[in-house]
Image (cartoon, grey):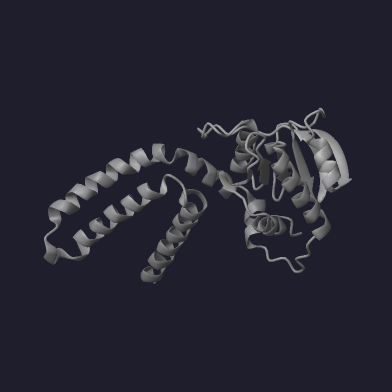
């Protein structure tokens, strides 16, 4: 009985560590550090399970190293741990992850309108910030902005983000495949970002760090299209790939 209990505990720990790695470490600057730590852990295990190799000195060294790292890693991975704890407390996000929709319908008209507007704004270097709420907690947004409650159209999106309008600097918030708000103010990320990222990118990243929202950004300087999710940016140069991504995001 004790054997099965231990096995279940090990399995649970392994799953939690895997989710943490996949959600917050993979494809980041911390990934190489984690790989190095796994290598040290493997050597530590070998020093115990293969006594014939006489690795007692190495095992003792790694034991004390592990004690030191267990303290320092809390500081090193502080941003990732903060994001992970926020995810653990977001019940709606877990429901979204494990829910399999019975009828995954796609609103292709709204999708086409967004892609068309984003492609045009990218070509014209018109800055844009579009929030797809998903499992967003409304308290995560500083100010939602002006109520619009309108059908999504490329013309309306282009009008909102036209640089002579009063709402162009804020975010468009899409709920239930409708433009719910315009001119929204999002929480800014406190992480150190590359110099090429401006306030729009910092706002997109900030909201994605504390919620399950997906945020699309069009850079005013470069025209680049990026999507922020779970504190990470993904750049999209191919409009087909962007459309496929937004299609998944907008599935009801």
Image coordinates of residue 133 in percent, x first then y, are 72, 47
In front here: 198 or 214?
198
The residue at the point 43 percent across, 66 percent down is 8
Q: Residue at x 59, y 41 (%)?
A: 209
Q: Which corner quadrant of the image does residue 46 belong to?
A: bottom left
> Where does residue 39 sit, x and y in percent of width and height?
29, 55
> If the image is split into quadrants, where does the C terminus sit?
bottom right
- Which image quadrant: the N terminus? bottom left
Left or right: 8, with 251 as reference point: left
Question: Who's the residue at 54% across and 43% down the image?
Answer: 83
| Count of numbered circles in the view | 0
Q: What residue is drawn where x is 88% and y is 45%?
A: 150
**The quadrant where residue 168 appears:** top right
Q: Position of residue 193 (x, y in %)?
A: 52, 34
Query: Vertical placement of 8 versus 142: above or below?
Result: below
Report whether 62 appears left or right of 9.
left
């Amino acid at each position: 009985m004790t054997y099965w209990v231990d096995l279940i505990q090990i399995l649970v720990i392994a799953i939690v560590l895997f989710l943490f790695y996949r959600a917050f470490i993979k494809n980041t600057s911390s990934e190489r550090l984690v790989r190095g730590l796994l290598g040290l852990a493997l050597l530590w295990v070998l020093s115990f399970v293969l006594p014939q190799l006489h690795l007692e000195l190495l095992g003792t060294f790694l034991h004390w190293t592990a004690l030191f790292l267990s303290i320092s890693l809390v500081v090193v991975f502080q941003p990732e741990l903060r994001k992970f704890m926020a995810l653990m407390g977001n019940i709606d996000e877990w429901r979204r992850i494990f829910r399999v929709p019975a009828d995954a319908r796609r609103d292709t008209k709204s999708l086409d309108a967004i892609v068309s507007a984003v492609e045009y704004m990218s070509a014209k270097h018109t800055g844009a910030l579009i929030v797809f709420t998903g499992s967003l907690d409304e308290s995560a947004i500083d100010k939602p902005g002006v109520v619009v409650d309108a059908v999504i159209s490329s013309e309306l999106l282009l009008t909102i983000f036209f640089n002579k309008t009063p709402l162009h600097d804020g975010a468009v918030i899409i709920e239930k495949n409708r433009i719910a708000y315009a001119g929204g103010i999002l929480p800014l990320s406190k992480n150190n970002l590359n110099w090429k990222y401006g306030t729009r990118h910092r706002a997109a990243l900030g909201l994605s760090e504390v919620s399950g929202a997906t945020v699309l950004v069009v850079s005013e300087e470069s025209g680049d299209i990026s999507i922020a999710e779970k504190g990470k940016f993904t750049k999209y140069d191919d409009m087909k790939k962007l459309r496929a991504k937004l299609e998944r995001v907008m599935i009801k």
